[in-house]
Amino acid sequence: MAVSIAASDSFTPFEFDATLKAISDSSSSKSVPSKFNFSNERSAFTCDSLPTVDFSALVGGDPHQRSKAVHDLATACREWGFFILVNHGVPESLVEAMFRAVKEFFNLPKSEKKQYEAKSASDPIKCGNFNVANTSNQSFTLWRDYLKLYVHPNFHCPHQPQLLRDVVSEYTQITRKLASKLIEAVCEALELNQRYVGEILKMDSSFQMFATNYYPRCPQPDEAIGIPAHTDPGLFTFLIHNGVAGLQIEHDGKWFNADSPRNSILVNAADQLEIFTNGRCKSVKHRAVVNEERERISIVVANGPSGEAVVGPAAALVEKDGGAMYNAMKYEEYVESQLTNTRVGGKSLLEQQMIDIQRQLN
Ligand code: OGA
Ligand code: NI
């Protein structure tokens, strides 16, 4: 969710005065305005082997099917860090209503959205554009408008459009349950004690964030980026989109286009899952590229442990591995620090948490 980027005083990560939608609607320009300029190589491999996890098998009563689903999930988290979740039970009508509602939000007049414009990284409701810095410390703006909400344990949502509150509340409640089941299953595959897991991650008060990204059509898609390469904070991120491709994921040092069939959810293991499993699950880098033909909307839910949880590698795995590969950190501090850390191309927060185990053993 957050782009891992280092704090700097030479720019402000938030943009107050304009939404990208307004700029792109009013302009017939054939080039990207200079403040969005970020040259990037969009070409990527086609990916037709993204793993699939059948949620109904995971929670159904058939022990054989369940153990296959648990195995598929653990393998997907280890090998790709991404998978397609099918038979998840989220009603299609809810997904459709959600895209209608977020589109209505992005279409609200600027004056209406102004009250939600981000003032600080930790605002529970924020929208607008996002500025980041490149490796030469020059600021540029991402080619997307966003709305980000903290939805659990406390629910925050704009009052307009009216439909938004109900659908976000329902969708995030369902995805919270799905995420809990996925975590339970991953921990089962790793033979972790569920009571121990519960005490560390405190999922009843899980910190859950909802975000929606609007990527307008872009006249020069190689000269702007929706979201640069990053990993997400949390345990599992859930992503759905309006049928327009744009997400790319890193695998074996190469970039792949990650598409997902209709009515599926694209799920990725996030930073705290990699840390908690001492590196067994991979929080993989991904990015959102833009295109000339069609606007794209994505809806992303970051399912974290409790904000109070201090997440480090699970004790039983540290014992097995002969050492912890990551430092522990309180989850709310991790999120805060990732949100204010805004430089593309530097060491990500996850990389900063890694311990050089070789040095430790010598
Ligand atoms: C994110 C993200 C990708 C997309 O919001 O963290 O990775 O395709 N989004 O919108
Ligand atoms: Ni992301």
Image (cartoon, grey):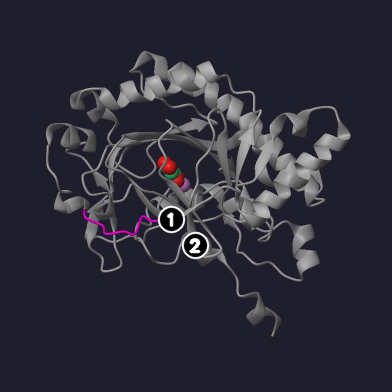
Please give the name of the residue rendered at 79% of the width and 27% of the height, measured from the top-left corner.
60
Magenta stretch secondary structure, dominant: loop
Q: Residues within 10 Å of mark 1 (few under 14, many from 20)?
A: some
Q: Residue at x 63, y 51 (%)?
A: 273
Q: Secondary structure at mark 2?
A: strand
Q: Quadrant of the N terminus?
A: top left
Q: Quick one: label 2 or label 1, which is nearer the N terminus?
A: 1
**Above or below 122: residue 79:** below
Residue under the image location 21 percent in, 44 percent down: 219
The answer as to whether callout 1 falls within 8 Å of ligand 1 is no
Is the residue under label 1 in contact with that under label 2 (CB below 8 Å)?
Answer: yes
Q: Is residue 1 in sight in this rendering?
A: no
- Queried whether the magenta region covers residue 42, the answer comes back as yes
- Tell me which corner region of the image, top left, top right, bottom left or bottom right, holds residue 18: top left
The quarter of the rendered structure image containing the C terminus is bottom right
Vertical comparison of 266 with 331: above or below: above
User: Which region shows up in magenta?
Assistant: 37-43
Residue 24: say if magenta: no
Using the image as rendered, state which of residue 134 and residue 12 is in the foreground.
Answer: 134
Give the residue pinned by disc 2.
254
Q: Which mark is residue 266?
A: none
Q: Residue furthest top?
A: 162
Q: Quadrant of residue 23?
A: top left
Is 23 placed left or right of 260 in the picture?
Answer: left
Q: Which residue is mark 1?
A: 44
The residue under label 1 is which amino acid type?
Answer: Ala
The answer to whether residue 281 is above or below residue 87 is: below
Give percent across and percent down for residue 308.
58, 44
**At numbered mark 1, what does the secondary structure look like: helix, strand or loop?**
loop
Q: Label 2 CB, ligand 1: below 8 Å?
A: no
